[in-house]
Image (cartoon, grey):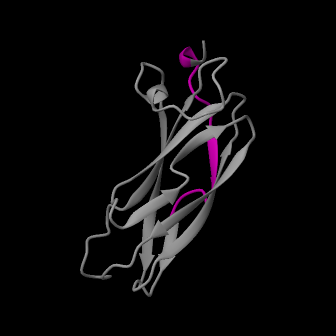
Amino acid sequence: MAQSVPPGDIATQPNAKIVFNAPYDDKHTYHIKVINSSARRIGYGIKTTNMKRLGADPLCGVLDPKEAVLLAVSCDAFAYGQEDTNNDRITIEWTNTPDGAAKQFRREWFQGDGMVRRKNLPIEYNP
């Protein structure tokens, strides 16, 4: 069963962080690529520490082995220097999909006792 095998690795481009550049008086969008580098189909979900400022599209999906998706990570306008941005990050969570499951994302894959892996991408804001 897929749930007993730990999820494999994913790769992201960029690998370590997302950088937004000033000015912050308008919405910014940054594209990141998420690649399923494992041999199993995975379901993924995107979380953020600041829902008011940060968003991602698509927020969830399913990737076959070696398949990639381009995510649009957006940062809404905000008062730079007047708001705390130290803990801002995007988190990608992923898990193996059950054997035989349709290629359609299901939230319950993350709620059972299967292993879920996470990758954090800190957000850096350049003044």
Nearest to the observer: residue 112 or residue 4: 112
From the image, give the main secondary structure of the stretch colored magenta.
loop
Q: Is residue 15 magenta?
A: yes
Q: Against 116, is 5 above or below?
A: above
Image quarter for residue 98?
top right
Q: Is residue 99 above or below residue 33?
A: above
Depth check: give the residue in front, 23 or 104: 104
Image quadrant for the C terminus? bottom left
The magenta region covers: 3-17
Say which of 24 and 58 sits in front.
58
- Residue located 54% across and 18% down the image: 3
76 w.r.t. 65: above or below: below
Give the quarter of the image for residue 41: top right
Which of the 4 image quarters holds residue 40?
Answer: top right
The percent coordinates of residue 31 (x first, y second) are 61, 65
Q: How many marks?
A: 0
Residue at 30% over, 82% down: 79
- Could you say where residue 67 lies in the image, as x and y percent from the top left? 73, 42
Residue name at image x 73 percent, y 34 percent: 65
Q: Residue furthest right?
A: 66
Q: Residue 39: x percent and y percent?
A: 72, 29
In the depicted structure, whether residue 97 falls above or below residue 60: above
- Quadrant where the image shows the N terminus: top right
